[in-house]
Amino acid sequence: MALVRKPTYNITINLEDRDKNTSTLTFYVNITNTIVEIITAVENVIIPRLIDLTNAIVRGWTISTSAEEDDNVLAPEPSDVQRKGVFSFSAANGASYVIAVPSIRNDLVVDRTNVLDTSNPLVSSFVDMIVSEAVLALVRPRTYLGSDIRRLEKAVKHHRRSNKG
């Protein structure tokens, strides 16, 4: 299995008209640019020049990149993306942060329950990655408002609908 990164970042700008209809415009820039350079270009050059051309308003923008599997690898037999490990965390501002890991392994669940075994080293390593400042340092996950994620509240297995292949 080898994930191959795309050669570009995607800059997607969201626009809205008088009837609240929305549309997007996407630019692609080389991955050799830094995120700071891209943000500066979006805010100081791209959006001002776009505003000059449109009657719509800019509602927001995103920067993204992607990587895809380059081999024709099949998922193992026990995989089931509808079986999710749902991790509920609390944040410093009192908010909740939930991550649903698709196809959670059955051997990480406490026998005859739907509770994930947080004492299992694989589960605790994942939780530490989210809550510990030492693991991911500057790029550790936060809530959408930027609040620190402090502790795990609950880890359970749920069956949740997914897109069919």
Image: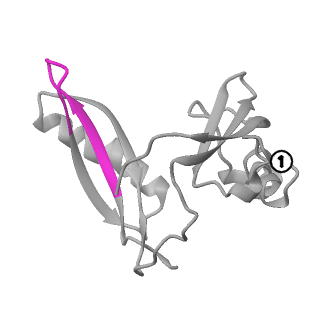
Whether 96 is drawn above or below 121: the answer is above
Q: Is residue 6 left or right of residue 45?
A: right
> Camera-side residue: 2 or 155?
155
Locate residue 67, reporting x and y percent: 43, 67
Can you identify the residue that label 1 sits on? 118
- What residue is at 21 percent from the left and 46 percent from the top? 25
Rendered-image quadrant of the C terminus: bottom left
Q: Is residue 97 left or right of residue 164?
A: right
Callout 1 amino acid: Thr
- What residue is at 72 percent from the left and 34 percent from the top? 89
Extreme residue in the right direction? 119
> Is residue 7 on the magenta stretch?
no
Magenta segment main secondary structure: strand
**Residue 15: quadrant of the picture:** top left
Locate residue 28, reporting x and y percent: 28, 60
Task: Look at the image and give the residue range highlighted in magenta.
Answer: 10-23
Locate residue 113, reporting x and y percent: 76, 41
